[in-house]
Image (spheres, rainbow, N blue to C red):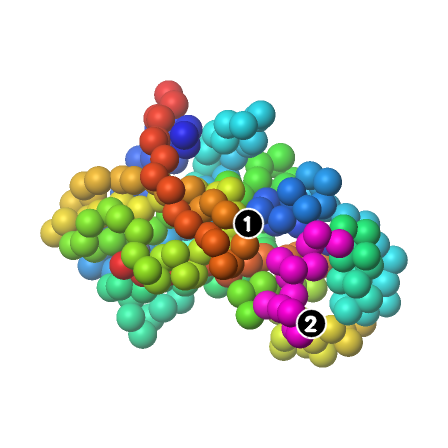
């Protein structure tokens, strides 16, 4: 399956915009990603191993927080998108 | 330096006027070539902060996911974001910095005074992570 890497994190994925991994769950896919590109870990996870609050992980068009989180099953034809949040105000 | 097409520049200022007195927000897409970044298009987004739309903005991540995926198909990447400051200077705020996570991307702010777009400034998010991040002034160059 494919994981789309947002522009700010591509410096840690050898400049690749997308990474192919073999996985049956979202958790396995993300582990596969950080195993291949270890520098991504601290940008995606807190020190105690939780996905950072501002990092959104989508399976196709669904937020995995509203599915079964990292236990969500994936298929080979699925796409995971990682998008840090965008917010602010004056 | 942020290079941006005239049409994208005009549309983000126009969006600020349309959304007034609320904050507008959107995504800037383009190409990286070498060290330079060129913004070739902008995508207006809804502001989900309906509780406080005059001084806060938030883009639905679902919209970002779609914009990122569709951008890839056209060979365009997300290189920045824009929002407006209704009746407030075009400078980043503490909230803007705290909520900024797209390193190497531009955060463009337009001040909208009494419904009219005034100053547009761009700030580049730099640093190695959440603890040392900072927004730096960057000049805007409008490409024809
Ligand atoms: Zn702001």
> Badge 2 local density, few (<14 within 10 Å), some, or many (20+)?
few
Farthest residue in the front direction?
Answer: B132
Give how far across and how far down residue A12 sits, in percent.
68, 46
Q: Which mark is residue B128?
A: 1
Chain where mark 2 sits: A
Q: Does the residue labelled 1 lie within 8 Å of ligand 1?
A: no
Residue B50 visible in this rendered orientation of the protein: yes
Residue at (29%, 66%) from the top-left corner? B53
Residue at (20%, 49%) from the top-left corner? B89
Q: Quadrant of the N terminus of chain B?
A: top left
Q: Residue B31 carries which label?
A: none
Nearer to us in this view, B80 or B26: B80
> Would you say B141 lies left or right of A18 here?
left
> Would you say B80 lies left or right of A77 here?
left
Q: In which quarter of the image is the C terminus of chain B?
A: top left
* Res B118 quadrant in image: top left
Q: Which type of secondary structure does the marked residue at label 1 adopt?
A: loop
Give how far across and how far down residue A18 sits, in percent.
72, 46
Give how far across and how far down residue A72 sits, in percent.
76, 74
Residue numbers of the magenta segment: A38-52
> Would you say B135 lies left or right of A7 here?
left
Q: How far apart are marks 2 and 1 (CA)?
A: 19 Å
Residue B115 visible in this rendered orientation of the protein: no
Residue A44 among magenta residues? yes
Q: Is residue B131 above or below residue B26?
A: below
Residue at (48%, 63%) from the top-left corner? B60
Residue at (55%, 32%) from the top-left corner? B31
Chain where mark 1 sits: B
The residue indicated by pointer 2 is A49
């Amino acid at each position: 399956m494919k994981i789309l890497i947002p522009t700010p994190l591509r410096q840690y994925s050898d400049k690749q915009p997308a990474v192919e991994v073999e996985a049956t769950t979202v958790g396995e896919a993300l582990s596969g990603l950080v195993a291949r590109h270890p520098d991504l870990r601290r940008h995606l996870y807190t020190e105690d191993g939780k996905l950072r609050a501002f990092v959104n992980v989508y399976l196709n068009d669904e937020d995995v927080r509203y599915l079964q989180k990292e236990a969500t099953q994936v298929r080979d034809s699925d796409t995971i998108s990682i998008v840090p949040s965008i917010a602010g105000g004056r | 330096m942020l290079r941006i097409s005239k049409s994208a520049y005009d549309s983000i200022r126009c969006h600020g006027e349309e959304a007034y007195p609320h904050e507008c927000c959107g995504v800037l897409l383009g190409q990286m070539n070498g060290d330079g970044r060129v913004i070739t298009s902008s995508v207006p987004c809804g502001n989900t902060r309906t509780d406080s739309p005059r001084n806060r903005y938030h883009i639905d991540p679902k919209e970002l996911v779609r914009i990122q995926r569709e951008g890839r198909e056209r060979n365009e990447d997300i290189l920045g974001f824009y929002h407006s400051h209704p009746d407030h200077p075009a400078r980043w705020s503490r909230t803007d910095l705290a909520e900024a996570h797209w390193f190497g991307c531009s955060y463009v702010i337009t001040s909208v005074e009494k419904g009219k777009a005034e100053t547009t400034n761009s700030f580049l998010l730099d640093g190695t992570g959440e603890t040392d991040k900072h927004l730096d002034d960057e000049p805007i160059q409008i490409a024809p």
